[in-house]
Image: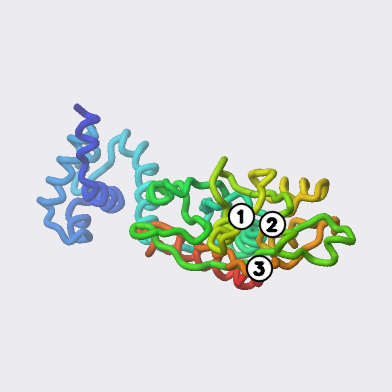
Amino acid sequence: MKHRKIHQLDLNLLKIFEVVYRERHLSRAAQSLALTPSAVSHALGRLREHLNDELFVRDGRSMQPTATCLRMAPSLLEQLAKLHQLLQQWGRFNPVETRQTFRLGMPDALEPLLLPAFTRTLSAQAPLAALASSPTDRKRMAATLAAGHLDLVIDVALPMSEPVRHRPLLEDAFCILARRDPRSARGITMANYLKANHIAVSTRSQGAVLEDIALLNLGLQRNISVRCQNYYSACSIVQQSDCLLTMPARLAHQIDMTGSLVQIALPFSLPPVQLHMYWHMNSDMDFANQWFRQLVANTAAQAGFK
């Protein structure tokens, strides 16, 4: 019974308790609270019933706390002060003080291009915060964002509608990555491109990738000899074979640290890959989410990804 009553406790009673404990006088407490002494006395009676303790006993004209009250009150008042501070700061966001972990969803292939820059910027502007990157299922993006498992998703342009909101983030042109040799220095013709063996990068086990969709729109089809899950693996295969890899140019430049590969212009026109950032409408007005979205957008622009 006692625990059930605690769950029904009116928090206003704790404010009255706080003032009576401080004043040790019923009339002065009532005056401070702008209540009648009768209302304060009635409130104390309700709180006594909830806590199963007398709380205060009369000593002349003063109200003296019981032994239990003296023992428990300091901790209770400390928690009330913290609650008051929390409610005063409700909705506010200070990046310098936050210890929030910002959860960012993105394809594995994008991490090398984006995550180092985001990490540097976050560390500079929110030194106590953390950043967690993870893949996301496009079909479950709305549910994942709604549940708060992710704060923001970066992915290719997708047909999305409410409750998921989005905005363009960056775009990158495609190039061909090939093993460096005298033949690659001469470039690649359309005929040679279509005759070559190619590597496709996708986390899906089957289905067309972006560049294949563009080729199909041109009425063309290439030969996929290897399908792998990330561009690092694909580049390693290119280093050891005659396979060609069609991929975003900035990412190709960042991955090829050894200089053993060469970027070659496409022999046909291919629309650039467009990336958007996605968030749930429930987070649209949240100050922390707004700040993080702006950080991501600014970092992309400053790094020359636009």
Gap between marks 1 and 3, in whole Å? 13 Å
Label 2 residue SS? helix
Residue 89 in view, yes or no: no
Give above or below for 164 relative to 204. Answer: below
Q: Position of residue 56 (x, y in %)?
A: 23, 40
Query: Where the N terminus falls, by quadrant?
Result: top left
- Amino acid type shown at disc 1: Gln
Query: Where the C terminus falls, by quadrant?
Result: bottom right
Residue density around tag 2, few if under 14, some if 14–19, many if 20 or more, within 10 Å: some
Q: In the figure, is residue 243 to the left or right of 107?
A: right
Q: Position of residue 32 (x, y in %)?
A: 22, 60
- Amino acid type shown at disc 2: Leu
Foreground of the two, 256 or 216: 216
Q: Position of residue 25 (x, y in %)?
A: 22, 51
Residue farthest to the left, as pictured: 38
Q: Earlier in the sequence, mark 1 or mark 2?
A: 2
Q: Which mark is residue 221?
A: 1
Q: Position of residue 245 (x, y in %)?
A: 71, 54
- Amino acid type shown at disc 3: Phe
Name the residue beneath numbered marker 2.
194
Gap between marks 2 and 3, in whole Å? 11 Å
Label 1 residue SS? loop
Residue farthest to the top, as pictured: 1
Name the residue beneath numbered marker 3.
268
Gap between marks 1 and 2, in whole Å? 7 Å
Q: Earlier in the sequence, mark 1 or mark 3?
A: 1
Label 3 residue SS? loop
Q: Earlier in the sequence, mark 2 or mark 3?
A: 2
